[in-house]
Image: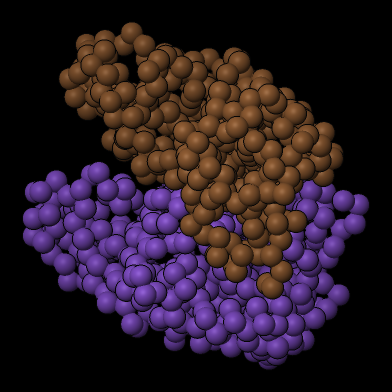
Chain colours: A brown, B purple
Amino acid sequence: MGDVREIRLCILGFGHVTQRFCELVRDREGVLAREHGVRFLVTAVGTGTHGSVVDRAGRTPAQVLAQFRADGDRFPDDERDGTDLIGASGADVLVESTPLAHGGRLAITHIDAAFDAGLDVVTVNKGPIAWDYRRLRTRADGEGRRLRHEGVTMDGCPVYNLAEFCLPGDRIIGFRGVLNSTSNYVLDAMAEGASQQEAIAEAIDAGFAETDPSYDLEGHDAAAKVAALANVLLDADITPDAISRDSIAGLTQSDVAQVLSYGRRLRLIGEAHRDEDGEVSAQVSLTPVRSQDPMYWVTGTSSCLVLETELAGTVEIVERDGLLTQTAYAIYADLLTIARAL
Amino acid sequence: MGDVREIRLCILGFGHVTQRFCELVRDREGVLAREHGVRFLVTAVGTGTHGSVVDRAGRTPAQVLAQFRADGDRFPDDERDGTDLIGASGADVLVESTPLAHGGRLAITHIDAAFDAGLDVVTVNKGPIAWDYRRLRTRADGEGRRLRHEGVTMDGCPVYNLAEFCLPGDRIIGFRGVLNSTSNYVLDAMAEGASQQEAIAEAIDAGFAETDPSYDLEGHDAAAKVAALANVLLDADITPDAISRDSIAGLTQSDVAQVLSYGRRLRLIGEAHRDEDGEVSAQVSLTPVRSQDPMYWVTGTSSCLVLETELAGTVEIVERDGLLTQTAYAIYADLLTIARAL
């Protein structure tokens, strides 16, 4: 593997995840060249409120990160939006990591702009996969573009790649899982006696929850993940808005105590199943589970997905204690999967 | 995908697993042609004591199975051994499914003969992977042959394919798992009050154990699986004989009762870890585990493997209630993975 191929990246969204991704690359430049024959160069970065930069000559992720931090967490330019940056970047791959908002509309615009300009795409923004997967997949396949999204559901834990590469000839019939850490943390804290207010404050303190956790508590995040999984794994064409959804906002101590008295725990379970006609039903529901159920043992930032398949039977995947590095790894892995196919 | 490629198989060992594999193919001939562009034909089958058959024109797995059953579970010819059959078969792929014996020596001979004749190999016999993996892998890579073995450890549940395809750029540092159903069944039956004798009789009745279960109870099977996993996932070069191993043969009711009184269960845990110098330590040890440990919940024919990785963190894979179909699927999946790369 004497030749080292340069892969040029346009990064949109420069929060904790993409910054950690830059660190992963920085710490592995030698391995990437030696073992994978690739070198990642950044030709553009765009952010919502921290400026942007274009450098078609390309900078290493290490350089980009160092400059950003040296300049007080800012890039120099404020003018261009994501679509302009993609066009100007001359990149090979768009790394889409903008914050999720409005059904992923911004990220979807970016991905379309990337395909327009002939770029492959890695997204850790779940919006496009939850709201618009079928159209984007059809477009990518039709135009010979790659669209990878391992990080949108269980951080760096293999889910989509597992289904694509490890279950050839098999068919996934359904899945269920605990997919949202914030709501799970709140349920466990309440099971230990906290009020919902206290549990939420704890979750924010521990770094598990946003200052406004309603998106998580009302099941929106879980529904988006269920939609993404159903669209990819079950060939569904649904959006999160079509998924019936329990909220744990407003759950009281006495609700939780009653479940505990039966030796169970409450879990916000996301699930979907395909019937024999190919119809997919999906829901997010607050469910008391027994200790025999793997969902019972999903705590902290862990997540669990149980796949029901026709031939491989029941396969469970658990990510224990997923953190920032795991989500950053999803980008890293997806880029290497693209590099392998180039 | 208008063209359908014929893939010719030489099957050695025609027990339950390969018979079920033939059924899987029989029931999916249309899908295989349409979606995968392949058609499997059997050009030779060899067994230890049920005869053999060579037909270079090729027969469908359905035809082979029907004839075998019509003829009272026999093939016509008794003359040729496996190596001769491989040479005479004109096949593209050897499916190695002979019984494990003598450190897999027979299966290793078959795989070498297959490589000599230019065949790719799918094995569900763990011997070659546990005892001679590094040499066989080096040979396969050097000669451009494929050697696939998903079925040697957790039936059809993705383990080796997961590591190969879903963790690019990551490194597995260690693993631990419950990998042997028979010993696990006996431990659970004893925990419910059975003597070891009674537990073994139960396990045989339930179809979990061989008439002579000592290979399982003494930890040999788990050690072979640990060696296979360590050789492939941790780049070790060890054999099962080098793995320290606890036996549960001779365990008494009072041993089990004592553990139970602490709220734990006994599990025969197989594990291996790589230190910073690349040294691999591996063992099979009888361990009391708490209910928070995923191993606690592995019962019946389930198995569980926890991978510690550098970047994806801790990833757990559980196969729930693996049966014959799952092991047959491992062959099916490995053949499709080979077909995809052809």
Furthest residue toward right: B2
Q: Could you say where residue A128 lies in the image, as x and y percent from the top left?
A: 65, 28
Depth check: give the residue in front, A220 or A112. Answer: A112
Q: Could you say where residue B202 lies in the image, as x and y percent from the top left?
A: 30, 58
Determine the residue positioned at 41% across, 50% down.
Answer: B313
Q: Is residue B59 left or right of residue B250?
A: right
Determine the residue positioned at 77% across, 36% down.
Answer: A88
Residue A155 shows in this picture: no
Examine the rendered structure and indicate whether residue A293 appears above or below residue B52.
above
Q: Is residue A43 left or right of residue B54?
A: left
Examine the rendered structure and indicate whether residue A33 appears above or below residue B37.
below
Determine the residue positioned at 58% across, 72% down.
Answer: B123
Examine the rendered structure and indicate whether residue B309 appears above or below residue B219.
above
Q: Quadrant of residue B338?
A: bottom right
Determine the residue positioned at 39% across, 57% down.
Answer: B308
Depth check: give the residue in front, B65 or B298. Answer: B298
Q: Is residue B30 left or right of residue A260?
A: right
Examine the rendered structure and indicate whether residue A261 appears above or below residue B289.
above
Depth check: give the residue in front, B121 or A19. Answer: A19
